[in-house]
Amino acid sequence: MVSLVVVAAIVFFFVFALSRKLQMIPTKKQNILEMIVEYTNGLSTNSLSAKNAKPYGLYAFVLFVFLFISNQLGLFLEIAYNGVTYVKSPTSNPIVTMTLAVMALGLAHFAGVSKLGFKGYFKSTYLKPFKFWLPLNIFEEFANFLTLGLRLFGNIFAGELLLGMVNNLAFSHGVVLVIPSFILGMAWVAFSIFIGTIQSLVFVILTFVYISQKIQPEE
């Protein structure tokens, strides 16, 4: 909970700082904000039509920025006291990632019911291509929930775990391993930043793929 509050505060102040004094001729910070917005809008329109994607533009933007900062937080800031870690990457906790997965899939199902009505949604989601595939379709929805949440958790948790092992290695045999461990640690941090960014993109893309499957079954 502490980590989530820290991430929410970082996201708020980051967007707040970039969005002050918007101009017709954008400044450098406005360019950064517009670049992120345009990119996340592109992620949604790649899966949905422009008309269907429009209501989800803000969600795509906030979700991507929140996930990106959440995935990177533990690489640069970790606060622990008396054996309890209070601040780390929230997405290294399965409860957080599974909750995000529930929100994403819940939004997809809600969008399906809103677009097609409950009868049309149920038929297109669970009774296609054949009615007797109902159990398999239910299992598929559960599998989507598990893979969406556990993929994100596994990648971020493994990254922080290995970084912690490298840090412990640096001081396990005196100064002889400090420099090699530092180099290895920096390389792993760079790789983890890349992985964290990719996982943010994957989560957002899959969210809109699932929404697309619910509101555009004919496609």
Image: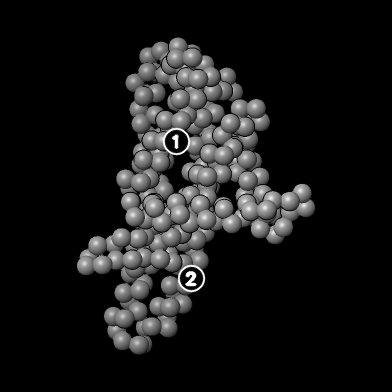
Say whether residue 130 is visible: no
Question: What is the residue that sits farthest to the right in this orientation?
Answer: 25
Q: Looking at the image, which residue is at 39% across and 23% down?
A: 137
Q: Looking at the image, which residue is at 57% across and 19% down?
A: 218
Q: At numbered mark 1, what does the secondary structure look like: helix, strand or loop?
A: helix
Q: Are the residues at dot 1 and dot 2 in contact (C-beta closer than 8 Å)?
A: no
Residue 187's mark? 2
Amino acid of disc 2: Ala
Amino acid of disc 1: Ala
Residue 74 in picture, x, y percent from top left = 40, 62
Q: Is residue 211 above or below residue 189?
A: above
Residue 104's mark? 1
Q: Looking at the image, which residue is at 63% across and 35% down?
A: 45
In the image, taking residue 120 as reference, residue 169 lies left or right, namely left
Label 1 neighbour load within 10 Å: few <14, some 14-19, many 20+ = many
Q: Is residue 151 above or below residue 45?
A: below
The figure's colour scheme reads one colour
Q: Looking at the image, which residue is at 57% across and 53% down?
A: 16
Residue 106: quadrant of the picture: top left
Residue 123 in picture, x, y percent from top left = 45, 14
Across the whole image, how many numbered discs are drawn on residues?
2
Question: What is the residue that sits farthest to the front in this orientation?
Answer: 21
